Image (cartoon, helix red, strand yellow):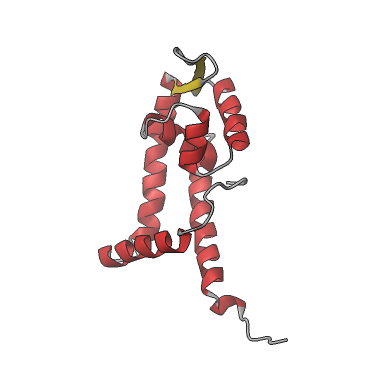
Amino acid sequence: MSMSYHLHASLMYQLTLTSRLQERRLEDGLRALGLTRLTWCILLAVHVEGHSQPSDIAQFIGVDRTATSRALRQMEQRGWVARSTGRDDRRTTRVELTPAGVDLLTRAVPVAEDNAHHFLSKLTPEETEALQRIMANLRLGEAHNLQHF
């Protein structure tokens, strides 16, 4: 068996480490507002991207429906979202942000922007563009639904 694999020389390890560092910094900022990464993404999916059905929200974020439903229940209990039955099809559920949810989103956007700026300010615009392209290429052909987000 070859022992030529060196952890710190592995590009995939570097990718994971970088991802975890930025995740931790973002999560720390969101936690101060009572949010998780998932609840933050749901706020964005609903209010900014216009997704209103739980299955569409889950697909857009890339997580399974169960995790999304659990998060939506918690968010509804906190008064951040309201769920209602669809008008045309009573089997569907529609999600919208409450005024408290909109306020929370407004306060969370600067946290995410600051996190992005913290890391991306270390790159040139050309490097940022190249990194976006490379990351998209690495995800090609991969399943996007993550059970744990």
The extreme right residue here reads 1
Image position, residue 71 (x, y; %): 58, 32
Residue 51: x %, y % from top left: 42, 30
Residue drawn at point x = 48 percent, y = 44 percent: 29
Q: Residue furthest left?
A: 125
When the figure is inspected, residue 7 is found, relative to residue 32, above or below; the finding is below
* Nearer to me, 76 or 83: 83
Above/below status of 101 relative to 16:
above
Foreground residue, 28 or 120?
120
At x 50% / y 19%, what residue is drawn? 82
What is the tally of numbered marks visible in this picture?
0
Q: In the rendered image, is residue 11 in sight?
A: yes
The x, y position of residue 35, in whole percent, is 53, 36
Q: Position of residue 141 (x, y in %)?
A: 49, 58
What residue is rendered at 41% in x and 35% in y?
Answer: 44
Residue at image location 52% in from the left, 42% down from the top: 37
Q: Is residue 32 visible?
A: no
Name the quarter where the N terminus is drawn: bottom right
Q: Quadrant of residue 100?
A: top left
Among the 4 quarters of the image, the one containing residue 34: top right
